[in-house]
Amino acid sequence: MEAAEAEAIALQIQRDLNEEAENLRRDRRMAVSVYVFYGFCLVGFSACLIALLALYNNDWGRSCDVGMKVWSVVWLARMILQLICNTAVTAWRMRAGTSVPRAMMLLPRLVHAFGFTWWLLGVEQLFFEPSCEEPTLARTVSQVMFWMTGTVYLIPFVVYTL
């Protein structure tokens, strides 16, 4: 009986070790996919910011849409900073496996609060500031960014109120 019992225990330990090894492999793949996703987003937002600055380069002389140009550039820069903060928090959680320190959580929350305030400033820029006579690139880009962000803010409100 003792030999059979010892063998059963050894088999159970082996199964547990195999399961743990599989979980580690899955965790590594998950970590890689998270970093690839954040890296892809960071490259995309950075490319958008560079393209926007290049497009606005020759157009800063027009004073009728300077507010919208500044709003859209700061909006993209804030998105990049938010993405970097989220990446740091996610990396901390994946490495440490514990809760994130409060100080580390404060910066993403401040950036998010600034983003909401900046979005509200976009309402003023787009709808209440006098704009150029003809449609401009800055106005179009700002409207796309404004409505995209507005949708992100509106979805949780709709989901939680229904």
Image (spheres, grey):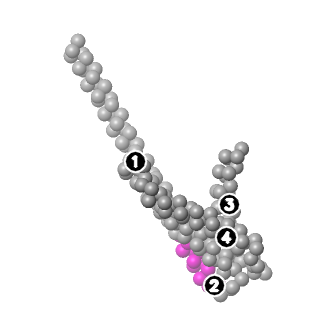
- Does label 2 or label 4 sit earlier along the sequence? 2
Specify whether 67 is left or right of 12: right
Q: Residues within 10 Å of mark 2 (few under 14, many from 20)?
A: some
- Marks 4 and 3, Cα distance to the nearest angstrom? 12 Å
**Figure quadrant of the N terminus:** top left
Residue 126: x percent and y percent? 72, 72
Which residue does the numbered mark 3 point to in the structure image?
150
Residue occupied by mark 1: 98
The quadrant where residue 116 appears: bottom right
| Front label number (2 vs 3) | 3
Question: How far is the residue under mark 3 from the one under mark 1?
Answer: 33 Å
Q: Quadrant of the C terminus?
A: top right
User: Under tag 3, what secondary structure?
Assistant: helix
Q: Residue placed at 49% from the left, 62% from the top?
A: 107
Q: Which mark is residue 121?
A: 4
Label 1: state its secondary structure: loop
Q: Nearer the viewer, mark 2 or mark 4?
A: 4
First in sequence, mark 4 or 3: give its number.
Answer: 4
Q: How far apart, in angstroms, are the residues tagged by discs 1 and 4?
A: 37 Å
Q: Which residues are magenta?
A: 47-60
The answer to which quarter of the image holds residue 137 is bottom right
Q: Amino acid at mark 1?
A: Thr
Q: Amino acid at mark 4?
A: Leu
- The stretch drawn in magenta includes residue 143: no
Q: Residue furthest right?
A: 133
Q: Are marks 2 and 4 in contact (CB under 8 Å)?
A: no
Residue to which mark 2 is pinned:
60
Circles 3 and 1, Cβ within 8 Å, touching? The answer is no
* Residue reaching furthest to the left: 3
Q: Of the residues under marks 2 and 3, which one precedes in the sequence?
A: 2
